[in-house]
Image (tube, helix red, strand yellow):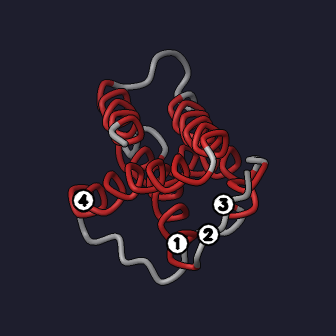
């Protein structure tokens, strides 16, 4: 199947994926938000397929807000919207997007040796739930 994404679609995918890493970074701020963001970003830029081409760039001009709640208000719906959009066009790319985001949040959570903190685990659960809501 062929995937045709508008500029707005690409922005939504970028907001969703990069925003998920930002949410994990905010949840991991007590340890090292920078490490969380770095590891999650590497996972996103390692993606392949159509998703990989879209996620090579972080979204520009997005205002995430001043609180984690404001960020989540934008990112979680964008994750669900991204999955719906990709499923309609190519279920394999939807699976690729989901897998990429899951790898990014798992990689971000592992920057802390051992188990992720309860805060990071809860944020990962919310992100996964948003991906699966589509």
69 is higher (above) or lower (below) than 98: below
Which residue position holds label 2?
A: 5
Q: Do the residues under discs 1 and 4 have CB atoms within 8 angstroms?
A: no
- Picture coordinates of residue 75 (x, y %)? 36, 57
| Badge 3 element | helix
- The residues bearing labels 1 and 4 have C-alpha atoms spaced at a distance of 16 Å
Q: Do the residues under discs 1 and 3 have CB atoms within 8 angstroms?
A: no
Q: Do the residues under discs 4 and 2 have CB atoms within 8 angstroms?
A: no
- Left or right of 113? Residue 93 is right
Q: Residue at x 39, y 58 (%)?
A: 78
Task: Classify mark 4: residues with Cα within 10 Å, few (<14), some (14-19) or many (20+).
Answer: few
Question: Can you tell which of label 1 and label 2 is closer to the viewer?
Answer: 2
Q: Residue at x 66, y 39 (%)?
A: 92
Question: Can you tell which of label 4 and label 2 is closer to the viewer?
Answer: 2
- The residues bearing labels 1 and 2 have C-alpha atoms spaced at a distance of 10 Å
Precedes in sequence: disc 1 or disc 2: 2
Which residue position holds label 3?
A: 55
Precedes in sequence: disc 3 or disc 4: 3
- Picture coordinates of residue 25 (x, y %)? 44, 48
């Amino acid at each position: 199947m062929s995937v045709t994404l508008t500029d707005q679609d690409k922005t939504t995918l970028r907001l969703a994926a990069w925003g998920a890493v930002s949410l994990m970074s905010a949840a991991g701020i007590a340890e090292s938000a920078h490490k969380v963001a770095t590891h999650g970003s590497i996972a996103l830029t390692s993606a392949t397929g159509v998703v990989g081409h879209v996620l090579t760039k972080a979204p520009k001009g997005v205002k995430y807000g001043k609180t984690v709640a404001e960020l989540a208000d934008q990112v979680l719906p964008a994750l669900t919207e991204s999955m719906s959009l990709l499923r309609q066009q190519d279920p394999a790319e939807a699976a690729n997007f989901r897998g990429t985001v899951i790898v990014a949040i798992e990689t971000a959570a592992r920057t802390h040796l051992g188990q992720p903190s309860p805060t990071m685990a809860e944020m990962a659960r919310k992100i996964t739930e948003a991906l699966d809501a589509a």
